[in-house]
Structures are given as structure tokens and as C-alpha cells.
Image: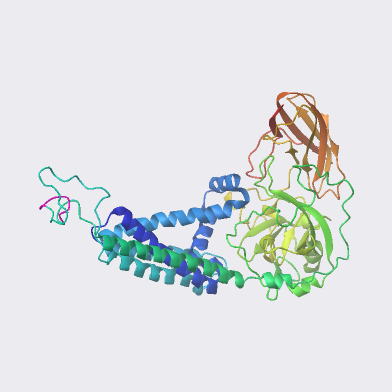
Amino acid sequence: MSSTTPRFAALAGIAAAAAAIGTAEVVAALTGPRSSPLVAVGGLVVDTAPEPVKRFGIEVFGTYDKIALLVGTALLLGGFAALIGMLAARRLTVGLAGIVVFGGIGAAAALTRAGADAADVLPSLLGAVVGGVALWAFVAGPLELDPWPWAPPTPSGSPSVPGSPPASGGPSDPAGPGRRVDPDSRRRFLTGVGTVLGVAAVGGVAGRWLAGRQGVSAAREAITLPAPVSAAPPVPAGADLAQPGLASYVTSNRSFYRIDTALVVPQVDPATWQLRIHGRVRNPVTLSYADLLARPMVERYVTLACVSNEVGGDLIGNARWLGVPIRELLDEVGPLDGADQVVGRSVDGWTCGTPTAALRDGRDALLAVGMNGEPLPVQHGFPVRMVVPGLYGYVSACKWITELELTSFADFDAYWVPRGWSAQGPIKTQSRIDTPRPRNRPAAGPVTVAGVAWAQHRGIERVEVRVDEGPWQEAQLAPTVSVDTWVQWSWQWPATPGEHTLQVRATDSTGETQTAQRQDVAPDGATGWHSVTLTVT
């Protein structure tokens, strides 16, 4: 293929890379989905990308940020593969060296994952072997194509007669600038590329399917949660205003936001799960899942919020959690003096640092095993996660948790702290307008303005709305379960025709009114008043 066009050479490289990735996905079904090159490289990108890039991804893609990252990683690998193919068309050894680099990056990335072992390099290495063979087959084949997608016109005086040989030095001369394409060779090439891409796609899908078959969904479905010794208070009548466009008081498991660093959801078998509580404690302990379920459980409604939630954003949800009070576990292990931080460590190595005082001050901080009446969904931390009212998730909501280590803020920085976020993240008082929305065009007359407000572990005392920077009008608050959940509010607006801007602000139970000062989500949560501009007809 020494005279192939760059586009066909690039296609050969992409097909070879697809063969490598498809093979790797099948092997990763045996070694674990986190050893997949796409996932491993994507995870490395998550860990090393500049913080503004990560925030941009969450702002643009929201809960689809992981899909966007995997697609972006695949596109980057595709571009690298195209370059490999073009280099291989000029010199095969250079292209094969590129395949070696391709596999080496995947293997190295896999080894950086928490809990990785030697077997985790196999998907990348075996994939590189298959990709190298595929590249060699394409490059060493008999295909002869034009050096560029166009050829100079036939010189005057040298008419091209069907069936006659080309003039020497003309555009169809093998020695000239425009080599004539062998249709059979082109057909074989394209058929080969199509076959390799098809087999690679089947292999990738099969690998993912096999990995899913090894998941823990069946184990989760077999679990019967114990009844709580202290049930959640019933949701009071009227807590959910059932207003169109308004977020429901209780967020369903399917709709609950998910923001974390795991590109593939960890599959943790409850039969082998253990929680180790250690560090600066008098009596370290290790608990099994059965040990945890045997302990007295409490059930509480708690609203969780992500620190990346923009003003007016939807990275927040309210659910009914079942779990063991963390305070009781800490009392049993006996924290030593100076142990002011509890580091929660996930099975994938992610860490969060929670103030020890916040876990022992009487709030319903839980090691949760249930969510809205069923075992934790796998994507939300099954079999066990942390739930702490009043703290942003990045410092408290460790999912797939396997360790609680007592240490100090002076001695250890959790995952997000070296990346520019505050070591401690108490949730700020916030409010949001859910309806009407900017795209709505309500008719003049009475219009219901409604939304939610939250100040977990403090509670909301008052919500106010104003129109076009006019006087603040107090909204009506719906009843709520406790200060640990958000509250719905509504206000009847006598709307007049024209364009208007609505603003909302909340005051918590301490008397502090949320500030109008706009602040980015970094380093400890966004501030500012949510506003909606709309046209009344």
C-alpha cells in the first residue's frame, strides 16, 4: 500500500485501532471493565485534566459528562489511529511503533487505577497485538491507490482510448503522478475495512454485555432490606405542590442526579464487601455487609446537592435513605484527639474528607444501604454509600465506600482539595425558580411562580420573589419533612403583558439571606439569585 491516498491510509489505521479496542473490550470482560483502554484512559483524563476543563464538562453536559468524555476519548484515539495509518503507509515499522504506543498508553492508564493488578494490562496488550496484525495486513496488501484524490487531466494530444495503454509519463502511468486504481484492489480493501470495523463493533458490544452479565444486579435484587427501628417521618400533606414544571418533593431513583469520577459504575459484590474503619482510633473494626444489615437502621429524608450545581441548576435531589448512623460507629471505634477528618474511600480509590464534628453533632449522617424503599441503585453507590445532611457531596457523599479512615485535615487532602476546591463544603442557602421557565409564554393574568429552596441542616425560613427589580414579595412555603430537605414554594403573580424578569431569594432559619453576589461553583459552591426572563402575552 505504498502509494495509497492519505484518506485510505487513515481508514486503515482507524480499522486497526477498532480491532484493537474491540479485542480489548472482550478481554476486559474477564479482567474487569475498568481495565478497558477507553475507560482507563478516560479515567486518567478525569484525574489529570485541569479543573476548568472538568467544570466546563459538567456545565455543558451535566449528568452526561461521562458519556461525553468517553466519546471524546474515542475521537482522540481515532485521530491518533488515523495518523498511525498514514505513517504506516510510508513506513510500516513506524505505524507498528504507533500501535505499540497505543497499547502502552492503555496499559499504563489501567495500572494507575486503584486496585489495579498485572492482569489489567492484558486488554491493552492483546488489543495492540490484534491491532498490529490488522495494520500489517492492510499495509502489506496489494492495494494500489492514487497518491491524492484527484489526478491531473490527460495532456492534450494524448487522448485516452478505452482499452489502450496510457502514454508514458501520463496521469495513468505507474511512474507518473496519478497511479490508476485497481477496482478489485479497492473493493478488497473497503470490504476488509468494513469487515474489521463490523467485527470490532460486535466484539465491543459483546465485551460490554459480558461485563454486564458479571455485574451485581442479581445480587442487589436478592437483598431484603431490614425494617428501620426509626422510620422516616411521613411526608406532610401539601409538601408536594404538584405544579407542572416544578420538581417533585421526592426525587425518583431514576431521576436522581449522578456526578462522580467513575466512568464505569463499580460492581461491588455485597457478599465480599467490607468496610474498614481505622486510622486514628482506639478500636479499629471491619464490618461485612451482613454485619451492617444486622445493626439498627434509621430512615430519613435528606436532600443531597453537588458543589458543581450552578445557580438555578438541577444537580440536587431529595430521597428517603435507609442506613446506619455513622455517629454510632465512630463512638464505637473511639476517635483519638486531633482526628478532625473522616476520609471516606471508594472501591475505585476516590476519597472525600468529612469533618468528624459534622458526623457526631446529631445530624442524620448515614452509611446508607437503601434509597426510596429499595437497595441502593448500583449507579448510586450499591452496596453502601455515605449520606450527610448539610454538606456538599464532594466532601461527604462517598459512593461504593470501603473505608472510613480517621485522620486530620492537616495530614491528608481528599481527592478534590489538591484540585482547587475547599477542604470543607457546607451547603449554602439557595433557591430556584422552576416555573414559569424562559421558554414559557404565559398569558396575562394570575400566574403561579413556584420553585424549591434549600439550606440543609438549617432549614428555610422565608422565600421572596420580585419582578423587574421591584419590591420583594413573600412566597408561600409548602410544609416539609425536616430542615434536612428542600422545600417547595409558590407565589401568585398578577402578570402583565411584556417582557419581565423574575428573581428569587431565600432566608434560612439562622436569619441569613442568600447573597446576590454571583460566585462560581469553585471553590465551595455557587452563590447569587436565580432569575428568569420571559414574555407575557
Q: Quadrant of the N terminus?
A: bottom left
Residue in view at x 68 percent, y 34 percent: 438
Q: Position of residue 94 (x, y in %)?
A: 29, 62
Q: Can see residue 104? A: no
Color encoding of the figure:
rainbow
For this rendering, which residue is in front, 3 or 57?
Answer: 3
Q: Residue 294 in the image: x percent, y percent?
A: 81, 73
In this rendering, does residue 366 appear at all? yes
Membership of 140 in magenta stretch: no
Residue drawn at (52%, 51%), measured in percent from left and top? 49
**Location of residue 526 (image quadrant):** top right
Task: Residue 223: name its quadrant.
Answer: bottom right
In this rendering, position of residue 362 left or right of residue 70: right
Q: Is residue 243 left or right of residue 6?
A: right
Q: Residue at x 66, y 51 (%)?
A: 423
| 171 part of magenta stretch | yes
Residue at the image position 83 percent from the left and 66 percent from the top: 297
Vertically, is 158 above or below 345? above
Would you say 64 lies left or right of 387 here?
left
Residues in magenta, as a range:
167-173
